[in-house]
Image (cartoon, grey):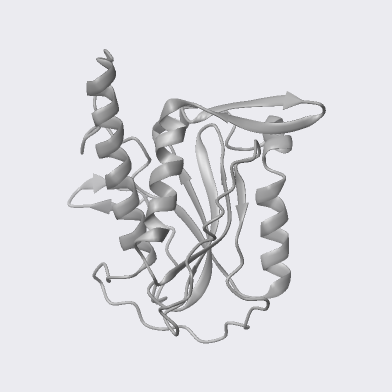
Amino acid sequence: MKKYKNKYRIQSHRKPHWDYSADALYFLTINTQNRKCILGKIVNTDGRAYLQLSDFGKIVETEWFKSFEIRNELILHQFIIMPNHLHAIVEIYTTNTNTCAISHAKSHTKSHAVETHGRASLRELSSIKRNPPIRLPKSISSFIAGFKSSVNTKIDDYIDEQKLSIPKYNRNNHFFQPNYHDHIIRNNWEYQKISNYIINNPKNWNNDTLNI
């Protein structure tokens, strides 16, 4: 772990020199702080595993979908909430800003997995664009920062409304971990593999590395 101003800091998971506002598909994982299982619990019914959302999980789900309603450049492909994290395939597609970001028929099934494809096929990614040392608008980092901020606000409002005796969330008490994991999807094979991983996440929860 490297030091900055004589303090240890977490290494970034970002790909060096990649422009995270570039048109591409991104596999994203966002964890709750300290990986606390506060988004819900995995239950099994008739041999099927699914997530039963907590009140906090319901707020996260609502704010996640809102993020795509207000951002024309984003397309949501696969998505699932787990007890202490969420996985998603998110596409930045700025070529046609009229593209529908998500299906209006949102999934309300017990799996809480959403599949809304923007296009039938993927292009191979071979070029890498330089990434300026700032948070670009309409980038993955800007999207996630906005999403996390809205979740903090809504959950703090919920804490107030319910008069819960728990700390509110701020710069020193994060709801989500400050960082997140991303992977740039480069071909159809990767896309299908990651899609299947997301879909099968609930039934594999007992063996999940994030289940601690």
Q: Residue reaching furthest right?
A: 47
- The structure residue drawn at horizontal position 65% and vertical position 39%, both measured from the top left corner, is 111
Residue 182 image point, x, y percent = 49, 59
Choose between 46 and 37: the one closer to the eye: 46
The answer to which image quadrant residue 185 occupies is bottom right
Please indicate whether residue 24 sits to the left or right of residue 158 in the image: right
- The structure residue drawn at horizontal position 29% and vertical position 45%, both measured from the top left corner, is 150
Q: Is residue 157 above or below residue 2?
A: above
Choose between 65 and 88: the one closer to the eye: 65
| Residue 157 appears in the picture as rendered | yes
- The structure residue drawn at horizontal position 67% and vertical position 66%, both measured from the top left corner, is 191
Q: Is residue 36 above or below residue 146?
A: above
- The structure residue drawn at horizontal position 43% and vertical position 26%, both measured from the top left corner, is 55
| Residue 12 appears in the picture as rendered | no
**Which quadrant would the C terminus be assigned to in this image?**
top right
Q: Residue reaching furthest front?
A: 105
The answer to which image quadrant residue 164 occupies is top left
Residue 112 image point, x, y percent = 60, 41
Residue 153 image point, x, y percent = 25, 38
The answer to which image quadrant residue 15 occupies is bottom left
Residue 103 image point, x, y percent = 54, 60
